[in-house]
Amino acid sequence: MNRSNFINQLESKEEFDICIIGGGATGLGTALDAASRGFKTILFEQHDFAKGTSSRSTKLVHGGVRYLQQGNIKLVMEALRERGLLLKNAPHLVHNQKFVVPNYKWWEKTFYGIGLKIYDKMAGKLGLGPSQFLSKEETLQLAPTLDPEDLKGGVLYHDGQFDDARLAISIAQTAAQHGAAMLNYFPVSGLLKMDKKVCGVWVKDFFTGKDYEVKSKVVINATGVFTDSIMKMDDAKHESIICISQGIHLVVDKDFLPGDTAIMIPRTDDGRVLFAVPWHNKIVLGTTDTPVKSQDFTSLLEPIPQQEEIEFILTHIGRYLSKNPQLSDVRSMFAGLRPLVKGKTKKTAALSRDHLISIGNSGLITITGGKWTTYRKMAENVVDIAMKTFDLPDKPCITKQLRLSGHDNPVTPAEVISLSEPELKEILKKSMQEEMCMTVEDFLSRRTRQLLLNASEAIKAAPLVAKLMAAEMNKEEKWIREQIDTFNSIAKNYLPT
Ligand SMILES: Cc1cc2nc3c(=O)[nH]c(=O)nc-3n(C[C@H](O)[C@H](O)[C@H](O)COP(=O)(O)OP(=O)(O)OC[C@H]3O[C@@H](n4cnc5c(N)ncnc54)[C@H](O)[C@@H]3O)c2cc1C
């Protein structure tokens, strides 16, 4: 991906078929779907690709055991199908993950065991392996740090696990290979209209401040928790449809859960599920569900875990492990925001419990909700709707069988701390030349995952990363200092306090 080449396409003032606002899972998936069907496609992301919720998930590619508990069969079936497709199309970033549900009450084994057998059946041919009833000994073999007292046994099942920000880059690259222009650090500041119909967007290059007018037959709003801000650009009287819920994760060392099996706690005090999942040689604990009121720009891009959420996770996971993790064991913590649709929009083209697609009077298409696992299907839905609603030729979706970029190349290391300077330089160069890595934070948070895995090590690595990047980009000392300061001000919120 080459940012300058994409900017040149803006200069040419050609009209696009489909313009997407938002470079998270939904927007990137939509760009890939549209470009691979042969539509002239452009995507704008105000910050870096996956800077929002899409780099802050629990890292599961799953049907959703929780939705099964709620009896939402259709949703689970669809997600299980997508899980299977994603494992085939992105084997470099998604893998089959074993989970154990520990049973401490006599009825749990039968209850969860039967539920998970149904889960297996629903996955059909795309299943990842049969679930199994486990004795107490077998359960402890797989998850030796589970509290053995009163443990009756467990149930083993399979789901997918992935690296969300890396998958985002892989999708962006695949879309670019199919001809899409993919621009990060390009906020959309307004909508172009003719006869009250949306016909493009105003965008600004964040680095140069230059404004561009971009014409497009279709404009799709895929901005997650920012959905309302784009709808307000369309209609000043728009009443907000999104409310926000925060979910946090704590990252601890592998000795809290050695081996390669994850734990799923099926019911917390607030009726949610809680996971402890191995990820890049660490354990991710999460998540929570906390309503958020503040909606200023910075807090939406860098949400901060609240004290009660941290305590909630430590207390709950502590009930199941023989050694309770303490605050001082937390290597990093990160929060993500869910956009929950609270009201009905006027014209709802497709509505499901999971994601919503609506078309405004101006023709602006909005897609919101859903989950990472179903990004491909959501993209297929929204491009189908765009094709039917606007003057676009009918072209079939091809993403079910589309292998994602990088599946045959070595994967970028998740941590930089063990790399020598020449190795670091090599990886940085690749990130800058091929993955549109523009800042120290892009590199340490999303091209590698150092910030999410160990925040204090990320802070230590920042000065060298800034120096190497500056040499590559011909930047001066001032740029290096600004990059380090900006990174540190973000990274401090990933450290436990
Ligand atoms: C705590 C948590 C855990 C989760 N765990 C899982 C999981 O394990 N598995 C799973 O399948 N799903 C999970 N999900 C759901 C999944 O992460 C989301 O469904 C998905 O990431 C949403 O992607 P999105 O593209 O819609 O939103 P986002 O990722 O938020 O992307 C929207 C983008 O729009 C950009 N934007 C906003 N305004 C503008 C503008 N004016 N101009 C240009 N760009 C703009 C933003 O910067 C942002 O990058 C989780 C969600 C949460 C909150």
Image (cartoon, helix red, strand yellow):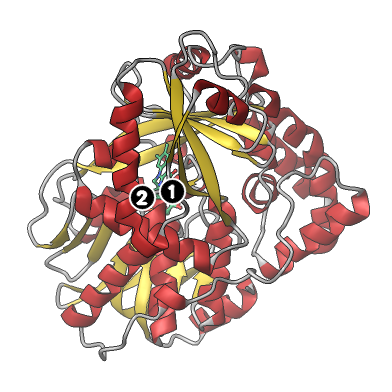
- Amino acid type, mark 2: Asp
Sequence-first tag of 2 and 1: 2
Viewer-nearest residue: 56 or 95? 95
The answer to whether residue 171 is left or right of residue 340 is: right
Query: Is 266 on the left or on the right of 393, as rendered?
Result: right
Q: Which residue is mark 2?
A: 120
Q: Is residue 407 visible?
A: yes
Q: Position of residue 95 (x, y in %)?
A: 56, 53
Q: Quadrant of residue 385?
A: bottom left
Residue name at image x 64 percent, y 44 percent: 445
Per the image, the residue denoted by label 1 is 130
- Determine the image quadrant of residue 132: top left
Image location (x, y in percent) of residue 155:
43, 32
x and y, in percent, of residue 42 in the image: 44, 75
The image shows residue 476 at horizontal and vertical percentages of 82, 53
Q: Residues within 10 Å of mark 1 (few under 14, many from 20)?
A: few
Viewer-nearest residue: 450 or 400: 400
